[in-house]
Amino acid sequence: MNGAEYLLFILMLSIFLGFELINKVPATLHTPLMSGANAVSGITAVGAVALAGTGKGDLAQWLGAGAVALASINVVGGYLVTDRMLGFFKKREN
Amino acid sequence: MNGAEYLLFILMLSIFLGFELINKVPATLHTPLMSGANAVSGITAVGAVALAGTGKGDLAQWLGAGAVALASINVVGGYLVTDRMLGFFKKREN
Amino acid sequence: MDTSLVTGLGYVVASGLFIFGLKMLGSPATARRGNMVSAAGMLVAIVVALLDQGIVDYTYIVGGMVVGGLIGAVVARSVAMTSMPEMVALFNGLGGSASLLVGWAALSPDSATFTLITIVLSILIGGVTLTGSLIAYGKLSEKLGSGQIVFSGQQIVNSLVVLGIVGGAALFVMDPTNTVYLYTVIGLALVFGIMVVIPIGGADMPVVISLLNSYSGLAACAAGFAIDNNVLIVAGSLVGASGIILTQIMCKAMNRSLSNVLFSGFASVSNEVTEIEGEIKPISADDAYYILEAASSVAIVPGYGMAVAQAQHVVKELSNLLEANGAEVVFGIHPVAGRMPGHMNVLLAEADVPYDQLLEMDEVNPRMDSVDVAIVIGANDVVNPAAREVESSPIYGMPVINVADARTVFVLKRSMASGFAGIENPLFYKENTRMLFGDAKESLGKLVSELSS
Amino acid sequence: MDTSLVTGLGYVVASGLFIFGLKMLGSPATARRGNMVSAAGMLVAIVVALLDQGIVDYTYIVGGMVVGGLIGAVVARSVAMTSMPEMVALFNGLGGSASLLVGWAALSPDSATFTLITIVLSILIGGVTLTGSLIAYGKLSEKLGSGQIVFSGQQIVNSLVVLGIVGGAALFVMDPTNTVYLYTVIGLALVFGIMVVIPIGGADMPVVISLLNSYSGLAACAAGFAIDNNVLIVAGSLVGASGIILTQIMCKAMNRSLSNVLFSGFASVSNEVTEIEGEIKPISADDAYYILEAASSVAIVPGYGMAVAQAQHVVKELSNLLEANGAEVVFGIHPVAGRMPGHMNVLLAEADVPYDQLLEMDEVNPRMDSVDVAIVIGANDVVNPAAREVESSPIYGMPVINVADARTVFVLKRSMASGFAGIENPLFYKENTRMLFGDAKESLGKLVSELSS
Ligand SMILES: NC(=O)c1ccc[n+]([C@@H]2O[C@H](COP(=O)([O-])OP(=O)(O)OC[C@H]3O[C@@H](n4cnc5c(N)ncnc54)[C@H](OP(=O)(O)O)[C@@H]3O)[C@@H](O)[C@H]2O)c1
Ligand SMILES: NC(=O)c1ccc[n+]([C@@H]2O[C@H](COP(=O)([O-])OP(=O)(O)OC[C@H]3O[C@@H](n4cnc5c(N)ncnc54)[C@H](OP(=O)(O)O)[C@@H]3O)[C@@H](O)[C@H]2O)c1
C-alpha cells in the first residue's frame, strides 16, 4: 500500500470519531466547542512551520511565515478565549 | 514518515472509536455483540489469504491455508449465529 | 530509533490529546481541563514540527509565531462575551487563510497529480473560508450592513465564478508551473467566498460561520493530504465534524433546511397575515414585583435581547433575590436562543449562574406547568407558540420553550417588534401573558431594587 | 489507478462497513441489519485480499475457505441458544489459532526487527487465546470439570513459563532463523493459556472468554502490524475494545475487580456465617395461581436457572396468559443474569418476548414498588438483597434487582442451594417472599395450565 491509502484510512476513522465525540457535547457548551474547534483548526501551523523553515528565502518561505502567523493567532487566541469562557462555567456550590 | 507510524495512528483512532461505539451497545444486545465481535476477529482470514496463495507449497503456505480454514469458521459461523440470534429480537407489534 | 519515528509518535500523541480533549468537552465539569488537554496536544504537535530536521532557519517561524501569538492573546483577553459570534467568525477566516497559504507554499514544480489536487482543494476551501468569514464578521459586528445583498444576474455571476474555478483548477493541475492558473484560482476562490455570503441575512450568519468552521477543518485536511501529515488530517476532520454537527443542530432548531438558510431567507414567507385573538396586557414593574414576590417557582427564559441589553448580570441578581425569597429558580435555554449555539449559556455562566441551573429545552418543558412565573427576557422566536399551534406559520414544527404553560408569563422587551424570524408572536396576546415593556436591563433593574428593598 | 490504490480503497470501505455495522448494533431495531453490514465489510475485505496480485495459487485458499465455511455454517445453524457461552469460547479459540498461524506464516528470514516483534506478539497472543479458550470451552460445556484446578507450586511453574516465553521471544527476535526458539515460544504460549485458565472456576468463564475475545482482537492487530495491513488493525481494535468493555461491565456488575476474578475466587470469603432472620414460606403452585390471578402488575426476573431448565418458552406462555388476564407484565433483566452478558435477553427473544418488554435493571428498579407480584425464575445472586443490606457480604455494593420491593415475591428454584457466588440469600426469608420449589419449567408449567383452564 502507498501513503495515500493510509491517509484515507486516517481520514475515515477521524471523521467517524469526530461525529461520535461531538454528538456528545451538551448544548450548554456549544459556544466553547465552536471556539475550541477554531483553535484546533490552527493545526495548519504544523504544516506551515516546515515550509517557513526551509531557509531559502523564496516565496514559499514567506508564504509559510504568513501561514505560521495567521495560524498562531488562531491557536493562541482560540485556546485562550475558550479557556476564558469555560472558566465561567461553575457548578452550584452547596 | 514511514509505515509503522501510520499504523500506530490507525491503531489509536480505531481503539478510541471502538470504545465510543461499543459503549453505546445496550445490555440487551451484549451476547450478539460478543459473537459478532468474534466474527469480526475472523478478519485474520484477509492476512491468511495472501500467505496461502504464494504457490510455493512450503510450510508458510500450509500454515496460511490452515489459518484461512480456521478464520473462515469464525467468519461464517460468527455472522450466521449472530444473525440467528438477532432474528429473535422483535418489537412488540401493536 | 530514527527521527521520523519520533515525529510519528509525537503526532500520534498529539492527535490522541486532541481526541481526549474533545471527549472531555462532553461535560461542563471536565470541559476546561479538556480544552487544556487539547492545547497540550497542539503544543506537542508544534514542538514535534519544530524538531523536524528539514528546518534550517527558525527566524521566519519564530517571527510568525510571536506576531500571531501576541495578536491572538490580546484579542482573546479583551473580547467581550457578547461579541463571541463575530470573534469566532474572524478567527475562522484566519484559519482559512492559513490553509490557503500552506497549500500555496507546498506547491513545487515536481508535485504529483494527487498532491496537486489536494493543494488546489486546500487553496480553494481556504480562500472561500477566508472571504466568507470576513463578510460574516462584517455583518455580525455591523461593520457591514447586515441585510441581504441581492442583485439581478447574481445567479449568472455565481455560475461564471464556479465555472472559472473548475476550469482554472483543472488547468492548474495539468500545468502547475503556469502561475496565471494559480492566481486565477486564488482570486476566484476569494470572490466566491464573498458572493456566497452576501445574499444571506445577518441573523443567519451563525449557520454560515459554523459551516465555514467546518470548511476550515476540511481545508486543514486537504493541506494534510498535500504535505502528507496525519495530524492535520485528524485535527481537520474533528473540526469538520464539529462544524457540520453544529450546523445541523441550528437548522433543526430553526426548523429550516440548510439550503433554505443558504439560498433564501424568511423574507419570502413572512408577509402573511395571521389572525391573533386576545389583547395585549402591559404590566408595570411594580405590579410585576407583587406577583414575583408570591411566586414559589420561577423559570427564566433568555433570548437575544438579553445579549443586546447586556442584562446577564442583573438577571443573576434577580435570580439570587428570588431564591433568597424562597422561590426555586431555573433557566430554560433554547438551543438557538441568541445568535450562536450556546450563546445564552456563556453569558449566564459569565454572570456566575451555575451550569446545573441552566436547563435545556427538553428538561424545562415538562416541568413548565408547575411554574408560577416564567420570565421571558428578550426572547421572541424561541418562545413563539405559533410553532406548535399555527400550522401555516413558517416556524411551525420548530421546537420551542412552552412558557405559556406556566401560570403567569412576563415578557420583557422594548416594543411589539417581531424577532429574528420576522413573524408575529401569539404569546403576547395570551390570557396569562403580561408585557413588561422597556430595555431588559432597566426593567430588571427596577424589579431587583423593589425585591431588595 | 494502480491496483494497490484499489486494494487500499477496498480496505477503507471494508473498515467503514465494520464501523457502521457496529454503530447499528447500538439499537435492537437496527442490530440485525448492522450485522449484515459488518458481514458485507468482511466480504469486501476478503474479495479485495483475493484480488491481490501476489496470489498465484488459489487451491489452498479455496480449500481452506470451503472447509472452514462449511464447519462454521453447520455449527451456527445447529447450536442451541442455551449453549451460546461455550460456542463463543470455541470460536474465540479458533480466531486465536488463526492469528498464531498467520504470524508464523508471515515469518521470513529477512523480516525487520519491528516486524519480528509483531510476529512474536501475534503468535503469543494467538497461542494463549487458543488454549485458554479451549479450557474455557471445556469448563463451560462440562466436558472438563468446572472446578478450580490448583496445585502446589503453581505460581512457580507459571513464573518459569513466563520467563521462558520472554527469553524465547527475545532470542527469536535476535535470531529468527533458529526454529528452536520459535517452537519454544509457540509451545510455551500454548502451555501458558492452559495454566492461566485452569485455576479459574467454571462460573467465571464468561469473564475469561470476554477477556480472551479482546485478546483475539489484539492478536489480529499484531498480525496486521506484522503483514502491514490496516484493515486487520481496525477490525482487531474494534474487537479488542468490545472484549475489554464487556469484561469491565461484568466485573462491575459482580462488584469484583478483574484481578480478583482472575487470581482468586469467591471461595475465600464465602464461608462466613450470616445471621438471617425470618422463616422460609413455601407455596404450592395452586396457591401461587390464586395470587397471580389477582395481580394487575407482574415483573418476571429470570436468572441462570431459567437457562438450565430451558424454561424460556413456558415463561413466555405464562406472560401471555397473565396479559390476557389483564395484568401488565415486564421482564427485569440484570446485566449479568445467567452465564454471559445479555444471556437472558437472547433466550427470551428466542421465545418471542418483544425486546421493549425486556427492561434493564435501572428501568425496572424504580417501578418495583408498584408491582404486585415479582416472579424470580432461577435467579439468585442477581436478586440478593444482601448486596444492599449486609455490609459484610462479599457481594455488598453489587447492584441488584430489588424484587423485595414488590408486594409479593415468588422464587422458583429447586432447593435452598445458593447461586454462583455461593452465599446465602436473605430474600428467601423475607415476609413477602414465597418459595415455589421445583424445576422452573415444571413449576411454570403448572401455573400455565391453571391459568389457561
Ligand atoms: N442561536 C443561534 O445559533 C441562531 C442561529 C441562527 C439563527 N438564530 C435565530 O435567532 C432567533 C433567536 O431567538 P431569540 O428568541 O433568542 O431572539 P429573537 O427572536 O431574535 O428576539 C429577540 C427579541 O429581543 C428583543 N430585544 C432586543 N433588544 C432588547 C433589549 N435591549 N431589551 C429587551 N428586549 C430586547 C427584541 O424585541 P424588541 O425589539 O421589541 O425589544 C426581539 O424580539 C431564532 O429565530 C433563531 O432561529 C439563532
Ligand atoms: N452473566 C454473566 O455474564 C456472568 C459472568 C460471570 C459471572 N456471573 C455470575 O453469575 C451469577 C448469575 O446470577 P443468577 O441469579 O442468574 O444465577 P445464580 O445466582 O447462579 O443462581 C441460579 C439459581 O438457579 C437455580 N436453578 C438452577 N437450575 C434450576 C432449574 N432447573 N429450575 C429452577 N431453578 C434452577 C439454582 O438454585 P437451585 O439449585 O436451588 O435450583 C440457583 O440458585 C451472578 O453471581 C453473576 O455474578 C455472570
Image (spheres, coloured by chain):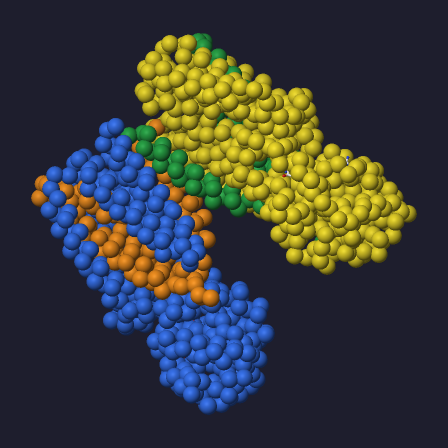
Chain colours: A green, B orange, C yellow, D blue
Q: Nearer the viewer, residue A60 or D325?
A: D325
Residue D432 lies, with reference to residue C370, above or below; the image says: below
Q: Position of residue C28 (x, y in %)?
A: 61, 45
Task: Determine if residue D227 is in view.
Answer: yes
Residue D180 visible in image: no
Q: Nearer the viewer, residue D48 or C19?
A: D48
Q: Residue at x 32, y 21 (%)?
A: C113
D304 relative position to C24: left or right? left
Query: Residue D378's quadrant in the figure?
Result: bottom left
The C terminus of chain D sits in image quarter: bottom left
Give the residue drawn at x 52%, y 34%: C259
Q: Write the residue at 68% across / 24% down.
A: C142
Image quadrant, ligand 1: top right
Q: Quadrant of residue D47?
A: top left
Q: Position of residue D276 (x, y in %)?
A: 54, 82
Residue at the outermost right position = C453
- Residue A13 placed where, x, y %? 40, 39
Residue D89 location (% of width, % of height): 29, 62
Relative to D245, does residue D16 appear above or below in the rendering?
above
Which quadrant is home to the N terminus of chain D? Answer: top left
Can you say whether C200 is above or below C361 in the image? above
- Using residue C412 as the reference point, say whether residue D279 is left or right of it: left
In this rendering, the count of numbered labels is 0
Q: Is residue C181 found left or right of D409 in the rendered image?
A: left
Residue at 47% across, 44% down = A20
Pick out the residue farthest to the left. B57
